[in-house]
Image (tube, rainbow, N blue to C red):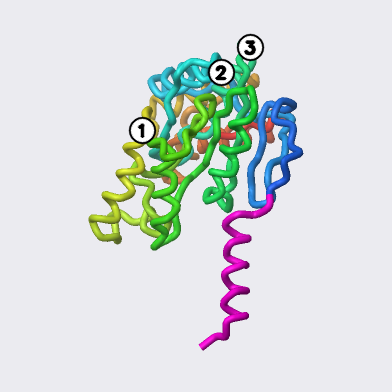
Amino acid sequence: MEDQAQLLARIASALERIAPPYPDGIDWQSAPAYVWDSNGARPVDNIEAPSLDLLRGIDRQKAAVTQNVARLAAGLPAHDMLLWGARGMGKSALLRAATLDAQAAGGTIALVQVASDAVATLPWLFAQLAKVERNFLVFVDDLGFAEGDTITPRHLRSWLDGGIEARPTHVRLAVTSNRRAILPRHASEQDDPVNPRDAVDDMLALADRFGLSLGFHNASQDDYLAILHGYAKAYGLTLDEGEALEWAKRRGARSGRVAWHFIVELAGREGRELGSLAR
């Protein structure tokens, strides 16, 4: 059995991981976006995102997200958002593009992307943002929990519901996930859940806390080609639909990301430069 000194050392180490000493010196008014990770916050000078016009095949989702972000940027009531579904269909790109659009329209809003290793520290982030007279969209990309982790989703549910500590009205949370239930990562890759039903219900309880939940599905052939034509027109590229379809077939998917990769291939062949846009 470990002695008392070893036990105290383990407890101290665990507390440091849970509640690291974040610095208070960050200027939350100076940048369009920030990254929050295990070391605290750092500003990001530019938000990389495609134009909203180039995000095709997701018109309903695009309208809902841009309207919600615009409300938040204007200081109006807005929803927390869960964007779930097919990979590569523009979930995170849409959040970035909607924030850029709201900023261009004069909204006082910043995007704060939370790294996967810092999800448990969200309360410290919200405490920081509560003191700032600016609107914030806190963004967690590809959220998933380790097997057996019931603490983090419960803390997140508590924050979404509004626990004993009122959350800031000018801060909203946006989460992307491959599945609406936000299953543990190793289970989310299976066709059938490997967790007990009560664990799935627990994760669905978290998903139900979001005021706006939007599903993203694999692109149809027409949507895939429409995405490609939009990019090709924007960058002055010559598109061969047959080759584009073969490209998707070889990758086993039709999505905005697959379309973008094909555009990168075309631009490379034709010697044209592209911006660093990503789906």
Q: Are marks 3 and 2 in contact (CB under 8 Å)?
A: no
Is residue 19 shown in magenta?
A: yes
Residue 158 position (above or below residue 110): below
* Residues at marks 3 and 2, CA–CA distance in whole angstroms: 8 Å
**Mark 2 or 1, nearer chain start:** 2
Residue receiving disc 1: 215
Inspect the image, locate mark 3, and give the three-letter code of the amino acid beneath it. Gly
How packed is label 1: few (under 14 Cα within 10 Å), some, or many (20 or more)? some
Q: Is the magenta stretch mostly helix, strand or loop?
A: helix
Q: Which mark is residue 149?
A: none
* Residues at marks 2 and 1, CA–CA distance in whole angstroms: 23 Å
**Mark 3 or 2, nearer chain start:** 2
Can you give x and y, in whole percent of width and height, for residue 269 in the image?
68, 34
Residue 189 position (above or below residue 68): below
Indicate left or right for 268 with 115 as reference: right
Q: Residue furthest left?
A: 197
The residue depicted at 52 percent of the width and 26 percent of the height is 228
- Residue 272 seen in render: no
Residue 108 is drawn in which quadrant?
Answer: top right
Residue receiving disc 3: 106
Q: Give the range drawn in magenta.
A: 1-21
Inspect the image, locate mark 1, and give the three-letter code of the amino acid beneath it. Gly
**Mark 1 or 3, nearer chain start:** 3
Residue 55 vs residue 144, the one in the foreground: 144
Is residue 62 shown in magenta?
A: no
* Residues at marks 1 and 3, CA–CA distance in whole angstroms: 29 Å
Residue receiving disc 2: 73
